[in-house]
């Protein structure tokens, strides 16, 4: 079965592109990461912000975050990288190439966590990236392009470091209070940046050869299907609405069932409809009602008003629009059925769909194939720094399985062999790009 998945995945991604003629030198194709070292360093990083019941609370700008950052900077130096902190607080470890005039190949992730988070979200990408640099260092192998390992600041608090790198971190965002209790402005200063000089952290389009982020999937698709590598086709867009349902509040004991205008009943019907619509359409779109508030909120009063949230996610803006249209149509039927009025108030485009570079997807897929690993094209349902960097550089993402699909939890787990598989794919992808695979791969 695994061989069949491998073959189908490769045909899907590679057949129309032709064979890549750029390949790493034969010695470099044999380079492999040290699985035991990756596992050991993940466990050591997990000591910073460790919770008694497992997992970590290493929120951005906290003392645990600062200690974790010091640890990864020491690993960078051990891997032969020259380390600096940019004005947004991003850590950058650079390894010079044979031609310093070439733009760098950049790869990395983040180490900050949510409160009560796990030991693998972000960490796998950072430790795996440092491991790639260390393998090259230990083998005295110098790439043509400079290489940069990046640890983005405050990913969990709104992609702060990557937004600053593309010039999208607004003055208002600097005033937001983070989980650490510090404002973003204060936090950036605490980790060695300077919020008054964010323009110096800006990277212009064309100044990065390519960006690759290795990350745990944070879902169950790969683990369920026993697929070793996810080739991320893009990071989903997210649209939010507030939904208001107006009925008529009345006595719960004296109002007959057929005389009610129950806003909560309408909300229940609509919640079921959201689920049915999202699951009945082909594709991987998701739609969620995550919050409901009924008024007046008394057990002996029929709710006269309900406000609920609606979130829709997909790689396609058109698909999100279609899902919403179907939900509106169903809402019209529910209004007539329950004697209520349902209105939708669009809040925000929380994230626009961010497709990865098609050439990068093919290079990552070929790297996985060369390593004998099964792989599959898939979207990312969660946000990542890669979605920002995709606006200024060819970007790719590599997913490795999350056991049980659990993430943002002390029970988060990615197996050592899967971490090593992802880091090996990352290493071979870097080497292929360095040898010109981007130029030779057709879109």
Image: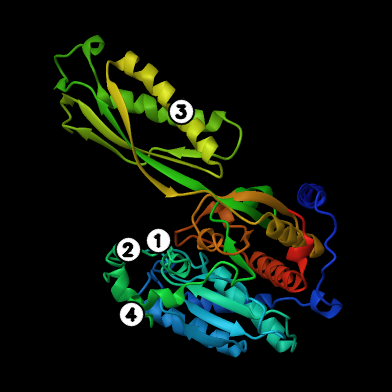
Q: Which residue is mark 4?
A: 189
Q: Quadrant of residue 269?
A: top left
> Do residues under tags 2 and 3 come within 8 Å of each other at their CB atoms?
no
Q: Residue at x 37, y 19 (%)?
A: 332
Pick the residue in front: 223 or 186: 186
Give coordinates of residue 130: x percent, y percent: 60, 79
Q: Which residue is mark 2?
A: 173
Q: Secondary structure at mark 2?
A: helix
* Left or right of 284 in this view: 242: left
The Cα–Cα distance between marks 2 and 1, rounded to whole angstroms, is: 9 Å
| Residue 25 against residue 173 in the figure, above or below | below
Q: Counting residues from the N terminus, which is met first, the one under dot 4 or under dot 3?
A: 4
| Residue 121 against residue 130 in the figure, above or below | above
| Residue 223 against residue 274 in the figure, above or below | below
The Cα–Cα distance between marks 1 and 4, rounded to whole angstroms, is: 17 Å
The Cα–Cα distance between marks 3 and 1, rounded to whole angstroms, is: 29 Å
The Cα–Cα distance between marks 2 and 4, rounded to whole angstroms, is: 15 Å
Q: Quadrant of residue 94?
A: bottom right
Question: What label does residue 158 carry, if any?
Answer: 1
> Do residues under tags 3 and 1 come within 8 Å of each other at their CB atoms?
no
Give coordinates of residue 377: x percent, y percent: 68, 50
Q: Counting residues from the N terminus, which is met first, the one under dot 1 or under dot 4?
A: 1
Q: Which residue is mark 3?
A: 325
Q: Residue at x 38, y 83 (%)?
A: 192
The crowding category of the residue bearing disc 3, from other C-alpha atoms within 10 Å (few below 14, some 14 to 19, many at least 20), is few
The Cα–Cα distance between marks 2 and 3, rounded to whole angstroms, is: 32 Å
> Do residues under tags 2 and 1 come within 8 Å of each other at their CB atoms?
yes
């Amino acid at each position: 079965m695994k061989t069949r998945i491998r073959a189908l995945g490769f045909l899907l991604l590679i057949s129309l592109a032709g064979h890549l003629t750029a390949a790493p030198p034969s010695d470099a194709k044999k380079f492999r990461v040290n699985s035991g070292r990756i596992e050991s360093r993940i466990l050591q990083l997990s000591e910073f912000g460790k919770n008694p019941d497992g997992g970590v609370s290493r929120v951005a700008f906290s003392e645990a975050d600062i200690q974790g950052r010091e640890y990864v900077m020491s690993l960078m130096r051990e891997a032969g990288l020259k380390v600096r902190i940019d004005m947004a607080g991003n850590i950058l470890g650079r390894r010079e190439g044979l031609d310093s005039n070439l733009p760098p190949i950049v790869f990395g992730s983040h180490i900050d966590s949510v409160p009560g988070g796990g030991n693998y979200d972000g960490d796998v990408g950072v430790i795996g990236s440092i491991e790639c640099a260390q393998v090259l260092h230990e083998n005295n192998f110098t790439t043509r392009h400079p290489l940069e390992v990046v640890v983005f600041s405050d990913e969990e608090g709104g992609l702060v470091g990557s937004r600053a790198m593309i010039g999208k971190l607004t003055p208002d965002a600097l005033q937001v209070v983070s989980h650490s209790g510090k404002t973003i402005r204060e936090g950036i200063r605490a980790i060695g940046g300077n919020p008054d000089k964010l323009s110096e952290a800006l990277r212009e389009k064309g100044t990065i050869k390519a960006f690759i982020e290795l990350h745990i999937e944070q879902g169950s698709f790969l683990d369920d299907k026993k697929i070793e590598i996810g080739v991320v086709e893009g990071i989903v867009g997210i649209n939010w609405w507030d939904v208001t349902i107006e009925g008529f509040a009345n006595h719960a004991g004296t109002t007959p069932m057929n005389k009610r205008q129950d806003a909560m009943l309408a909300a229940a019907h609509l919640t079921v409809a959201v689920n049915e619509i999202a699951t009945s359409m082909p594709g991987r779109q998701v739609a969620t009602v995550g919050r409901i508030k009924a008024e007046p909120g008394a057990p002996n009063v029929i709710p006269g008003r309900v406000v609920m949230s609606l979130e829709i996610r997909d790689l396609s803006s058109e698909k999100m629009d279609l899902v919403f249209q179907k939900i509106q149509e169903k809402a019209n039927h529910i209004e007539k059925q329950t004697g209520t009025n349902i209105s939708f108030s669009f809040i925000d485009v929380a994230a626009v769909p961010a497709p990865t570079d098609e050439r990068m997807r093919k290079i990552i897929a070929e790297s996985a194939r060369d390593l004998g690993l099964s792989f599959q094209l898939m979207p990312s349902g969660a946000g990542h720094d890669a979605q920002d960097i995709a606006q200024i550089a060819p970007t790719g993402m590599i997913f490795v399985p999350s056991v049980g699909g659990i993430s943002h939890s002390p029970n988060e787990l990615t197996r050592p062999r899967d971490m090593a598989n992802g880091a090996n794919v990352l290493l071979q992808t870097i080497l292929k790009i360095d040898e010109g695979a981007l130029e030779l791969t057709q879109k």
